Structure formats: structure tokens, C-alpha cells
Image: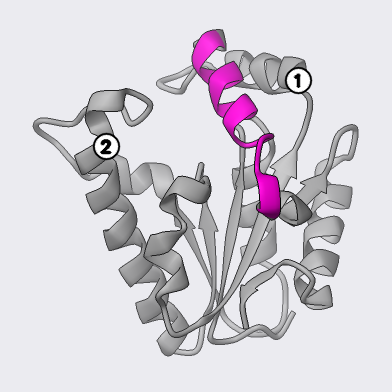
Amino acid sequence: MNQANEILVLTGAPGAGKTTTSKALAATSGSPKVHLHCDDFWHFIKHGAIPPFLKSAHKQNDTVVKVLAQAAEGYAKGGYFVIVDGVVGPWFLDAFTGLSARLHYIVLQIDVESAIARCQARGGDTLTDAKVIASLHHQLSSLGVLSKHVLDVRGLSPELTLAAVVGAVESEMFLLKA
């Protein structure tokens, strides 16, 4: 892949395969690549953090996403293909659409039952609340005009999901901003 100076926002419900795919994509040949894991940007807040799925976290989330978008643009300007991996719904896209880099937006779609099962199987300090996962899944399944950015990866292996994402980026059909 040779998408230097571009940004891919790879999103989807928790458990959709964003991080697995992003890590693999960042390791592919071609232009240099950066993987920005959105969750890390929330974890940088050490005191006063609000779980990002709560309504009271709106101001915090807005700040975090703006910082994330600026970091992505900085890497893109430096010649990197930047993969932004996280739950970046349409409500966060304004932070990215104003950037100078070409912007791809791909929403990985799986069924809600698989998303919940994957999240609950992870363990550790990760999201496992079925109601929250189902809510995020619903929000990222109701995209309106952005529904053309959905990439259905139900039943695909990690390797096939990676291949589908590479094909989607290279097709330029998932560009939000050229």
C-alpha cells in the first residue's frame, strides 16, 4: 500500500476487528504507516477521566478526538499513512474533515451478537457491557448518507478482513475527502 500523506479512520462497534486489522495493516509493505489506537488517547487522561460512552463525557470526548485528529494530521504531513483505530462515529468526523490530508472512512460491520461475544471473551480492562456494546453497534449501523462507508466483514477471518480493507482503501470508494 502506498497511501503516504493520507488518513484512514477505521471504525466499527467494539469487537468488529478494528485493532486486529489496524495492527496488521500498519505492518504491510509500501509507504510508512502509523497506527493510532484511539483508546490510548482516552487512557492518557490520568485524573478526571469519564468513561467515553457516558453522556457526561461529551466535552472530554470532543477534546480527545480533536487531539487525535491533530496527531493524525501531523503524521500524515510527515509522509505517513495513518490508521486511526477506534469508535469514531459520524458525531466525531468534524475533527477529521477539516484536515489537509486525504481522508478514508471505513466502518467495519459485524452482527451485534458477535461483537458482544468478542468483547466479553477479551477479558482484562476492556469494555464488556452488552448494553453499551449493543448501543454503539446500533449507532454505527444507522449511518444514513454515510452507509456507503460500511464494509461488511461478518464471517471473515482477520486475513480476509485485512484484504477487504486494503481493497477498500485502494479503490478510493471510501474517501470522505479527496
Which residue position is annotated with label 2?
A: 58
Q: Tell whether 59 sits left or right of 168.
A: left
Give the camera-side residue of 139 and 18.
139
Q: Is residue 79 magenta?
A: no
- Kind of residue at badge 1: Ser
Tell me the SS state at disc 2.
Answer: helix
Residue placed farthest to the left in the image?
47
Q: Position of residue 14 (x, y in %)?
A: 58, 30
Is 140 covered by the magenta stretch? yes
> Spatial distance from mark 2 to mark 1, Cα to Cα?
28 Å
Measured from the top left, where is residue 77 in percent x and y?
A: 42, 88
**Viewed as shown, does residue 51 lie left or right of 175?**
left
Is residue 167 in sight in this rendering? Answer: yes
Tell me if mark 1 has few (under 14), some (14-19) or many (20+) residues whose alpha carbon lies within 10 angstroms of its own: some
Q: Is residue 96 above or below residue 149?
A: below
Please report the residue visible at 23 percent of the width from the left and 26 percent of the height from the top.
56
Rendering coords of residue 102 (x, y %): 57, 81
Q: Residue at x 77, y 76 (%)?
A: 172
Mark 2 vs 1: CB contact within 8 A: no
Q: Which residue is mark 1?
A: 114
Left or right of 104 on screen, residue 56: left
- Where residue 10 appears, as percent x and y from the top left, is 61, 54
For the record, the magenta segment spans 131-145
Q: Quadrant of residue 111?
A: top right
Q: Which mark is residue 83?
A: none
Question: In the structure shown, which secondary structural element does the residue marked by tag 1 occupy?
Answer: helix
Image quadrant in which the C terminus is located = bottom right
Q: Name above or below for residue 33 compared with residue 89.
A: below
Q: Earlier in the sequence, mark 2 or mark 1?
A: 2
Asked whether 38 or 136 is in front, the reply is 136
Q: Given the image, on which type of amino acid does mark 2 rest?
A: His
